[in-house]
Image (tube, helix red, strand yellow):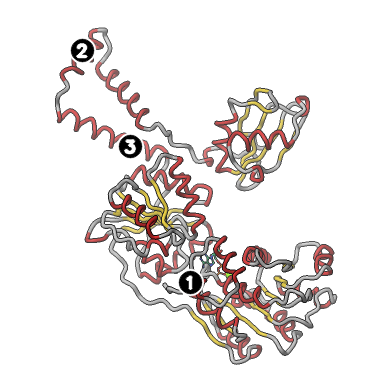
């Protein structure tokens, strides 16, 4: 891991502010190497795996080189798919947050071309698009490239795999001679090197190489967890494993703050550590962690570098690390001084591929673990509780209590029933926070993906409008109104879609509530 900060890079204050807002603490290795070279005007070929921050590596210099008075197209970025083009444009939008008047547009197939043409006519300085659609616009002369100073081929290997070679060459050949050509790719097969040789001038190769690190000998597991279920799964794991101290790793400061707030609101002793904190503040948190007042430390990679606590029994990779090396550093926070430790990594969807990279790099096997169910957690908690009961019997001094129980038995209650009732009562006490079911427990409601469709028994006849539904749900549950999805209002009832992860909460809170003064009944909808 480098020690270079964004502060140390030759980039504008606006860019520094933007990356700070995005929660980036320091440049990733590829960013640290590529940004200065691209800013110097060199043609750069960058190689690094997925998720290493390549977008910002070319995005920041691209933004920096835009002449703001010139409203013509100055940078073209080619991406293999519509999703990647959208993703890159979103990232670059965020990176350019403080650049006044910068215009960016994503163009890709599948979107009405008229709309893109209209937007292009208004003047766009950075275009991010798929090769097919970009070529289309160039032919129609809706994209004029006379002032283009930089061309970026993003995920070049993937573009070639998808058969875009000719399109790419046609586009690049049409660009002004005097330009910078940047190429980013996860792999460097011969075809990529050919492209580089043909279209780049004296290219500088930047590559993120890993140094081999010793991997601690601890249990490594991964769980397939969707973003929306991460907090619940983390809570269950912590409840089950009951680690004395644990560290939860997130990729950004923002995430750290979020996760800390959520854990605290669930009653855990959690606190956060990130690079923005001043030394005294960090010392305070670390002291609390060392003496156990804080049991869960949520941290970024940078902040965790200084952590030298021996009793960390579990590490959770809440976010998959940006870099294989980070993974090793992270899990090295546990299993210290020969103690036992475990590392749990949350992954979802395609990111599993990255996990394979980590396995290859660390030469260890990360085993899959099922997400613990509520009954698993219950079972573990119950047996821990029963252990306490046994301890208490061993300890003795029960005379006074035995007298009370004998009175109950005289009333003809069976001793086993008495014991069971007491267990039930005290376990309830213990679990003040009942485990919340994952929203997966709600069946199909016919909602859009990731959403749950809820039925409410009020509608137009009650003069209900969409804003009333949003107002009531957002107001009562505290979730952001913009998260609420489709609302269909009928005469006597209404359907509203909410994100899965909020469904239980909305149901619980709204079931005793009113909308426009009318007491409502709310339940998951039946699938249509
Ligand atoms: P790649 O193109 O290499 O696959 P991306 O540019 O899409 O990677 O970045 C992956 C994720 O990492 C994005 O969510 C991005 O916002 C984030 N990211 C990029 N640079 C940093 C950084 N320096 N610190 C923290 N997160 C970063
Ligand atoms: Mg990328």
Callout 3–callout 1 Cβ contact below 8 Å: no
Residue at the spot of label 3 = 381
Of badges 3 and 1, the one in the foreground is 1
- Which element type, helix, strand or loop, lies under badge 2? helix
Q: Secondary structure at mark 1?
A: loop
Residue 219: percent from left, percent from top: 31, 58
Q: Nearer the viewer, mark 1 or mark 2?
A: 1
Q: On the rendered structure, is 351 left or right of 343?
A: right
Return the x and y of residue 265 as percentages of the image width and height.
46, 40
Q: Which quadrant does the N terminus fall into? A: bottom left
- Locate the C terminus and report the quarter of the image it occupies: top right
The residues tagged by marks 3 and 1 sit, at their Cα atoms, a distance apart of 45 Å
Q: Quadrant of ligand 1?
A: bottom right
Q: Is residue 340 left or right of residue 174?
A: left
Q: Is residue 471 above or below residue 426?
A: below
First in residue order: circle 2 vs circle 3 = 3
Q: Is residue 510 above or below residue 211?
A: above
Residue, far front: 280
Q: Position of residue 148 (x, y in %)?
A: 74, 81
Asked if residue 79 lies left or right of residue 368, the reply is: right
Q: Are marks 1 and 2 in contact (CB under 8 Å)?
A: no
Write the residue at 73% across / 90% down: 177
Q: Earlier in the sequence, mark 1 or mark 2?
A: 1
- Disc 2 from disc 3: Cα separation: 28 Å
- Pointer 1 local density, CA inside 10 Å: few below 14, some 14–19, many at least 20: some
Question: Which of the two discs, 3 and 1, labels the residue nearer the N terminus?
Answer: 1
Q: Judge the density around disc 3: few (<14), some (14-19), many (≥20) Cα neighbours within 10 Å.
A: some
Q: Position of residue 521 (x, y in %)?
A: 63, 25
Name the residue beneath numbered marker 2. 406
Q: Nearer the viewer, residue 494 or 414?
A: 494
Q: Which residue is mark 1?
A: 5
Q: Quick one: 331 or 39, which is closer to the camera?
A: 39
């Amino acid at each position: 891991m480098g020690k270079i900060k964004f502060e140390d890079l030759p980039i504008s204050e606006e860019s520094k502010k933007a990356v700070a807002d995005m929660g980036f603490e320091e440049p990733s290795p590829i960013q640290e190497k590529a940004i200065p070279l691209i800013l110097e005007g060199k043609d750069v070929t960058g190689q690094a795996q997925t998720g290493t921050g390549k977008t910002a590596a070319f995005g920041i210099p691209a933004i920096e080189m835009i002449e703001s008075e010139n409203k013509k197209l100055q940078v073209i970025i080619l991406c293999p798919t519509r999703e990647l083009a959208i993703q890159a444009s979103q990232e670059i939008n965020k990176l350019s947050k403080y650049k006044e008047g910068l215009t960016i547009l994503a163009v890709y197939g599948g979107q009405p071309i008229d709309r893109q043409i209209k937007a292009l006519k208004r003047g766009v300085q950075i275009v991010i698009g798929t090769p097919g659609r970009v070529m289309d616009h160039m032919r129609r002369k809706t994209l004029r490239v006379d002032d283009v100073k930089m061309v970026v081929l993003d995920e070049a290997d993937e573009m070639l795999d998808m058969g875009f070679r000719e399109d790419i060459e046609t586009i690049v050949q049409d660009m002004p001679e005097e330009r910078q050509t940047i190429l980013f790719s996860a792999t460097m097969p011969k075809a990529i090197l050919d492209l580089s040789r043909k279209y780049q001038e004296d290219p500088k190769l930047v590559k993120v190489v890993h140094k081999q690190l010793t991997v601690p000998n601890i249990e490594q597991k991964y769980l397939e967890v969707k973003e929306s279920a991460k907090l619940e799964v983390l809570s269950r794991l912590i409840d089950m494993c009951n680690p004395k101290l644990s560290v939860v790793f997130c990729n950004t400061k923002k995430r750290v703050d979020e996760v800390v707030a959520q854990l605290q609101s669930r009653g855990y002793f959690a606190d956060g550590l990130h690079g923005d904190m001043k030394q005294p503040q960090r010392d305070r948190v670390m002291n609390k962690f060392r003496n156990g007042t804080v049991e869960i430390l949520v941290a970024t990679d940078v902040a965790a570098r200084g952590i030298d606590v021996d009793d960390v029994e579990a590490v959770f990779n809440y976010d998959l690390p940006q870099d294989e090396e980070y993974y090793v550093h992270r899990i090295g926070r546990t299993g210290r001084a020969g103690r036992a430790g475990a590392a749990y990594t949350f992954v979802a969807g395609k990111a599993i591929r990255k996990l394979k990279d980590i396995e290859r790099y660390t030469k260890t096997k990360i085993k899959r673990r099922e997400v613990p169910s509520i009954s698993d957690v219950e079972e573990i908690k119950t047996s821990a509780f029963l252990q306490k009961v046994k301890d208490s019997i061993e300890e003795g001094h029960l005379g006074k209590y035995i007298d009370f129980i004998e009175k109950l038995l005289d009333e003809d209650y069976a001793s086993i029933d008495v014991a069971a009732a007491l267990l039930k009562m005290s376990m309830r006490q213990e679990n003040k926070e009942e485990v919340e079911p994952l929203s997966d427990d709600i069946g199909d409601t016919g909602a859009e993906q990731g959403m749950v469709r809820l039925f409410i028994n009020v509608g137009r006849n009650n003069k209900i409008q969409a804003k009333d539904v949003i107002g009531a749900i957002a107001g009562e549950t505290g979730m952001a109104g913009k998260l609420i999805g489709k609302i269909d209002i009928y005469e006597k009832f209404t359907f509203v879609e909410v994100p899965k992860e909020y469904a239980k909460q909305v149901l619980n809170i709204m079931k005793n509530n009113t909308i426009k003064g009318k007491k409502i009944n709310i339940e998951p909808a039946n699938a249509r």
